[in-house]
Each structure stands twice: as structure tokens, then as C-alpha cells.
Amino acid sequence: MNDNRGKRRRAAAKTVAGARRAHGERKAVLIGVVVVAVLALVVVGGVLLVGSSRDGELAAPPGVTGIDAPVKRQGGTVVVGGDAPTTIDVYEDFLCPACGRFEQTHGPRIKQEIEEGELRVRYHLLPMLVRLSRPEGYSLDAANAALCAADQDRFWQYHQALFAVQPREGGPGHIDEELVDLGTELGISGDFARCVRNGTHDDEARAELARLQDTDFFTGTPAVTVDGEPVDLSDRDWLDEVLAAERGTAGRGSTGG
């Protein structure tokens, strides 16, 4: 931004000098005043744009809690829940606006079914929109951080927080230090900070995305599958229907695509 500001100032200075030579000192002064005013507006506009580009500071939502169920990371996925009659696979990107709406709409019910022993969920954390933040990379950074949180048994809280204060697609994402600070706020210690800063699980997240892109069913996020078959998320009763269909088939679970 400083380089651009300097260029604008140099261009403005040239304009003023030319005006002096052509039209005299008084007219040049007037032009200079106009140019300075325009530059001031540009600078102020730029500051306002940067200041408003992020929707909110990354912090744990009020009342955030964990989940009363086993949580285990398996490569680039996180399995939440124990033995249950129904297993679903959920595919998400932390930058995906539709994924944020999915979590807001269905997250509480999914948590309830997991804690009641009716549902097990495999969360696939995908860096699909990695090029759609400024600078690029937030989708991957967030996926890695959530996998790091799963290593410390804080996945559910961390997952909730990332979607609760979700950056806008095309804007700046939360930086590593914010991701680390969120973990600290949620009581995560140990190797978490190093895991986030080093991108410990980056390759696993990338590999999971590459694997899914080779399948026939995966077209984007959010997505849900049961036994590798896509679920129609446009049906608002999809979870009721999945649970009803699977309750009678003990031991049946998703293959994850």
C-alpha cells in the first residue's frame, strides 16, 4: 500500500509542476490542493476498506462447549462419535459460505444425535477454496489448524469457532497467530502452536482433497454422503430421512466415498 501511495504522490507532484509551468503559480496551487484532497480520499478509502474487510475477530463463540463423544483424527479426516447405527461423511471447507450456513442450520442437531449415540460423523476438512482468500491459503491453514485441534481433543470447539467467525470469500483469512490464539482460548496447549505454524497436517488435507476429486460423487462443499452415496441437502428433512433409513441396519456405516 505504501508503494502505491508513493506512486500516487509522485504522479500528483508531476501534475502540479506541469500546471505551474503552463498556467502560473496561483492556478498550480489550486490544482495542488485538489490533488492532495483526492489523495486524502484515496488513502482514507483504502484504510476503511482494509479495516472493514474482515467480518470479525477470531474468538470462541459465547457458550461454546465440547461434545460428549469420542473424537479421533484419521489422516485428513476427524471421526466424531462412537458405535452408532448411522454414519455420515461431511465434506467442508472453512472458507465456504454455504458450509457456514450448513453448520448453523444442522450443527446443533448433528451434535445432539452424536451425543445420543444415534450418529457418527466423519468430517473431511478440505482446502478446496485455497486460492479464494487474500493472501491465498486460508482454507489450508484452517483445515490444518482444525486437525491440530483434533490431536488435542478440542476439535468440536475449534470447528464451531472457525465457522462462527468465518472470513469472507475473497477477503483476508485469519492468520496463523490468530489460529494459535483461538486454540489457547479454548485451552489447547502442548504441540498445538507448533502444529499450526509448521502446517503439520497440510499434506494430509491436500491428499484428502485430491482423493475426493477423483471420485464420481464429489462436486463441492458442503456435501454429505452415506455409504458413499450423496445426500440431497436441498431436502430440509435429509437428516431425519438418513437416520430413519439407517436405524434398522445395525453395523452399517459409510465407506467415506
Image (cartoon, rainbow, N blue to C red):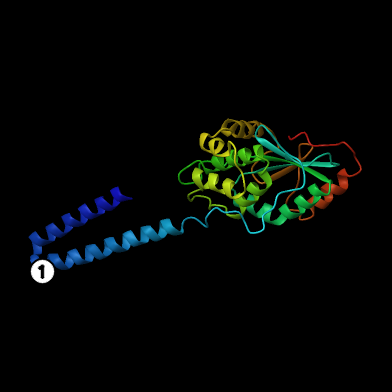
Q: Nearer the viewer, residue 206 or 235?
A: 206
Up the image or down, 181 lies above or below 195; here it is below
- Residue 175 visible? The answer is no
From the top left corner, tell me how far across and down residue 58 is, in percent. 54, 53
* Residue at (64% x, 47% y) in the render: 159
- The disc labelled 1 sits on which kind of residue? Arg
From the top left corner, tell me how far across and down residue 184 is, in percent. 57, 47
Q: Nearer the viewer, residue 244 or 104?
A: 104
Total marks in image: 1
Q: Is residue 190 left or right of residue 135?
A: right
Up the image or down, 106 lies above or below 196; here it is below
In which image quadrant can residue 59 be found?
A: bottom right
Q: Nearer the viewer, residue 205 or 80?
A: 80
Q: Secondary structure at mark 1?
A: helix
What residue is pinned by disc 1? 26
Q: Is residue 210 left or right of residue 51?
A: right
* Residue at (65% x, 55% y) in the render: 101
Q: Residues within 10 Å of mark 1 (few under 14, many from 20)?
A: few
Q: Nearer the viewer, residue 190 or 228?
A: 190
From the top left corner, tell me how far across and down residue 221 is, in percent. 64, 45
